[in-house]
């Protein structure tokens, strides 16, 4: 692959890394798919496929943390059903009212309102909302680390192949 192709791969990975934090693009899936494209378009080879396997492991860990951590936290605090759905719907609504920053604001408001409707206790709702948002933040952090790991493996692949 020529230099322009490698630059395009790097830019797509950078967009994916941004998408992990600002969920406008599919984040870690874009980083992983770009790694697959690099592996195939650069001619494959044993080294590239081993690196891609490691990228796949990191992608799996990132996706599991994105879904598993909030779900575990919600089940631990016996959250009302549809809590994350309320957060997601209001997050999307907030995204269109206040671009980019409206997503986390709307999500947090949706989770808070769901807890508030279920418990009718302001302090308990605020505590539960904080725990939920913190669990999602941890998932995003782990997913970001995994995404950076995928990009690092690609960079190592550039150096050794």
Image (cartoon, rainbow, N blue to C red):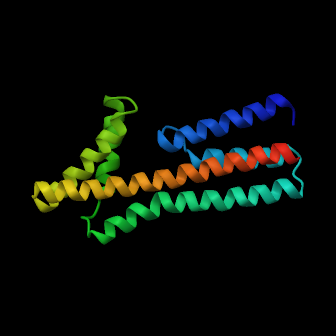
| Quadrant of image for the N terminus | top right
Give the vertical position of 11 relative to 118 (above or below): above
Q: Which x, y percent locates residue 161?
A: 88, 47
Taking the spot 22% from the left edge, 51% from the top edge, the residue there is: 112
Q: Seen in the image, is 7 located left or right of residue 68?
A: right
Q: Seen in the image, is 58 located left or right of residue 65?
A: right
Q: Quadrant of residue 62?
A: bottom right
Q: Which x, y percent locates residue 53?
A: 74, 60
Label tally: 0
Name the residue nearer the viewer: 15 or 137.
Answer: 137
Q: Can residue 37 be seen in this snapshot?
A: no
Taking the spot 28% from the left edge, 46% from the top edge, the residue there is: 108
Give the vertical position of 78 relative to 46 (above or below): below
Q: Seen in the image, is 76 located left or right of residue 7?
A: left
Q: Seen in the image, is 28 located left or right of residue 86?
A: right
Taking the spot 26% from the left edge, 65% from the top edge, the residue there is: 79
Q: Can residue 110 be seen in this snapshot?
A: yes
Give the vertical position of 149 relative to 65 (above or below): above
Taking the spot 39% from the left edge, 65% from the top edge, the residue there is: 71
Q: Which x, y percent locates residue 117?
A: 14, 56
Q: Which x, y percent locates residue 141?
A: 49, 51
């Amino acid at each position: 692959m020529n230099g322009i192709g490698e630059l395009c791969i790097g830019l797509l990975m950078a967009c994916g890394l941004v998408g992990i934090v600002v969920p406008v693009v599919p984040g870690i899936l874009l980083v992983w798919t770009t790694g697959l494209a690099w592996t195939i378009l650069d001619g494959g080879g044993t080294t590239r496929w081993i690196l891609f396997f490691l990228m796949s492991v990191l992608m799996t860990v990132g996706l599991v943390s994105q879904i598993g951590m909030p779900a575990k936290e919600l089940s631990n605090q016996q959250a009302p059903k549809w809590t994350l759905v309320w957060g997601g719907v209001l997050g999307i609504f907030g995204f269109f009212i206040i671009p980019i920053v409206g997503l986390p604001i709307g999500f947090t408001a949706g989770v808070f309102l769901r807890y508030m409707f279920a418990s009718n206790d302001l302090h308990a709702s605020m505590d539960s909302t904080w725990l939920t948002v913190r669990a999602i933040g941890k998932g995003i952090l782990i997913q970001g680390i995994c995404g950076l790991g995928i990009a690092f493996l690609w960079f190592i692949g550039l150096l050794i192949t």
